[in-house]
Amino acid sequence: MEQYGVTVWFTGLSGAGKTTISSEVAKILRSQGYKVEILDGDTIRKSLTKDLGFSRADRDENIRRIGFIANLLTRNGIIVLVAAISPYRQVREEVRQTIGNFVEVYVNASIETCEKRDVKGLYKKFRAGEIKGFTGIDDPYEFPLNPEIECQTERENLEQSVEKIINKIKELQVSNSLSLGCQP
Ligand code: ADP
């Protein structure tokens, strides 16, 4: 199967649902024979970017390195799912421009909801004063102004969020194979 490479970039607060949605999307697409790679911020920070901290410069560098890998995979026909907070607009735009085949997904849940979920216990650690510079509380989160997709995870369930993304990826597969077919 000829595959159209694309990077689907999930941005949102910690606990908004990026990992949950991207893993479900990957599971479904793989079961249908697609080649999919996930670049998850939590995993990447333990390997590729373990030397980086959480200053703006380091957060941007984290995103640039993830974008670099995403670009290599995308141009080789892989569907790349990036799940990373990616709090700053400017560097998100930069990776969008570099990669080209890029779909931004805003995984949107309020900070209150994310704190209630507290999947990784990070909000608790923040409240206990153990960590500082927490995105959405005492560090900025710049929400996307024109994301291709928004998943409002407080209002929609996982299946609804996943469906939107799968539909978009499939749409791109179809329109790309049509445009390739039209070439002389
Ligand atoms: P992130 O990767 O953005 O930090 P996670 O995916 O680790 O967030 O955690 C999101 C939490 O929210 C999970 O416990 C998940 O079960 C829950 N959740 C509730 N509703 C949704 C939804 N519609 N989409 C995704 N996650 C949801």
Image (cartoon, rainbow, N blue to C red):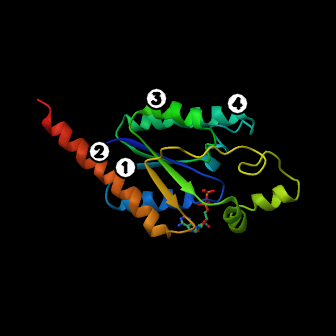
What residue sits 72% from the left and 63% below the top? 115
Tell me how far mark 3 sits from mark 2, CA to CA: 20 Å
Tell me how far mark 3 sits from mark 4, CA to CA: 19 Å
- Graded by Cα atoms within 10 Å as few (under 14), some (14 to 19) or many (20 or more), the crowding at tag 2 reads some
Tell me how far mark 1 sits from mark 2, CA to CA: 8 Å
Q: Horizontal and vertical percent for residue 59?
A: 67, 37
Residue where numbered disc 2 is placed: 3
* Sequence-first tag of 1 and 3: 1
The residue positioned farthest toward the front in the image shown: 145
Residue where numbered disc 4 is placed: 57
Instruction: Tell me the SS state at disc 1.
Output: loop
Q: Residue 57 is drawn in which quadrant?
A: top right
* Sequence-first tag of 1 and 4: 1
Q: Horizontal and vertical percent for residue 75?
A: 37, 34
**Amino acid at circle 3:** Thr
Instruction: Tell me the SS state at disc 4.
Output: helix
**Amino acid at circle 4:** Ala
Answer whether residue 68 is visible to the viewer in this image.
no
**Amino acid at circle 2:** Gln
Circles 1, 4 touching at the beta carbon (< 8 Å): no
Residue where numbered disc 1 is placed: 35
Taking 28 as reference, is 97 above or below it? above
